[in-house]
Amino acid sequence: MNPEALLRGLDPVVGPATRLLLLGSFPGLASLEARQYYAHPRNQFWPLLSSLWGVDLAARSYPARLDELRERGLGLWDIYASCRRVGSLDSAITDAELNPLAELAATLPLLRAVAHNGAESARAAHIIRALGLSAFRLPSTSPANASWSFDRKRAAWAEVFCAHGIIAAG
């Protein structure tokens, strides 16, 4: 991709049952090229959800994965609508424009909290709190976050998901 080009993100994945909105920073190159969230094969997002929900999301089509999120009350989006970036690292993001988070939240009457997938997304936590929503920082599922094991990430995600009814307790 042209490093000078302004990159545009993906549309939100939400439904009338959305209770928890998961916000990443901005799609990586593999996701932008595929027009699919978390398309990089080493990203742990889909394996993590598969583990938490006890379903093989990798065996499902991308639209079926998104349906599963909506049915379970989990929304998905990014904090940035557009940016310039060479590669896929958050540290390379420049000229970022925020997504209209308040506008989206206003359309989701059951939304109670936002979980940030990683540190860059969590920089927007003050915006989320200003909307009257709880904000949680989760460890990133990115392959760049190798300091957290899969099991440690799973435990952190499970705590927030359980608190918001995205997975059953215990």
Image (cartoon, rainbow, N blue to C red):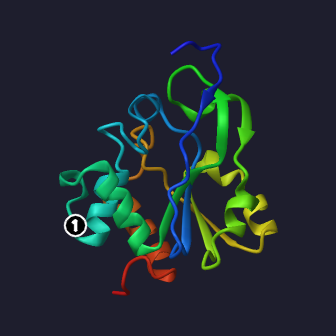
Which residue: 70% across, 47% down? 99
Q: Nearer the viewer, residue 132 or 66?
A: 66
Rendered image quadrant of residue 93: top right
Of 94 and 78, the residue lying toward us: 78
102 sits to left or right of 23: right
Asked which quadrant contains residue 34, the reply is: top left
Residue 70 placement, left or right of 5 = left
Query: Picture quarter containing residue 48?
Result: bottom left
Q: Relative to residue 164, is residue 31 depicted above or below?
A: above
Quadrant occupied by the C terminus: bottom left
Q: Is residue 150 visible?
A: no
The residue sitting at 77% across, 74% down in the picture is 132
- The residue that appears at 32% across and 57% down in the rendered structure is 65
Residue 131: x and y in percent read 78, 69
Residue 64 percent coordinates (x, y): 30, 58
Residue depicted at 57% across the width and 38% down the height: 9
Q: Specify the amino acid type for callout 1.
A: Val
Q: Report the number of discs.
A: 1
Residue 68 placement (x, y as % from top left): 34, 66
Task: Judge left or right: residue 147 versus residue 22.
Answer: left
Q: Within 10 Å of the Cα at label 1, are there few (<14), some (14-19), or many (20+) other Cα atoms?
A: few
- Residue located beneath label 1 in the image: 55
Picture layout, residue 84 above or below residue 161: above
**x, y percent for residue 146:** 39, 43
Look at the numbered disc 1 and give the secondary structure of its residue.
loop
Eyeballing the image, is 98 above or below 15? Answer: above
Q: Residue furthest bottom?
A: 169
Whether residue 72 is visible to the viewer of this picture, yes or no, is yes
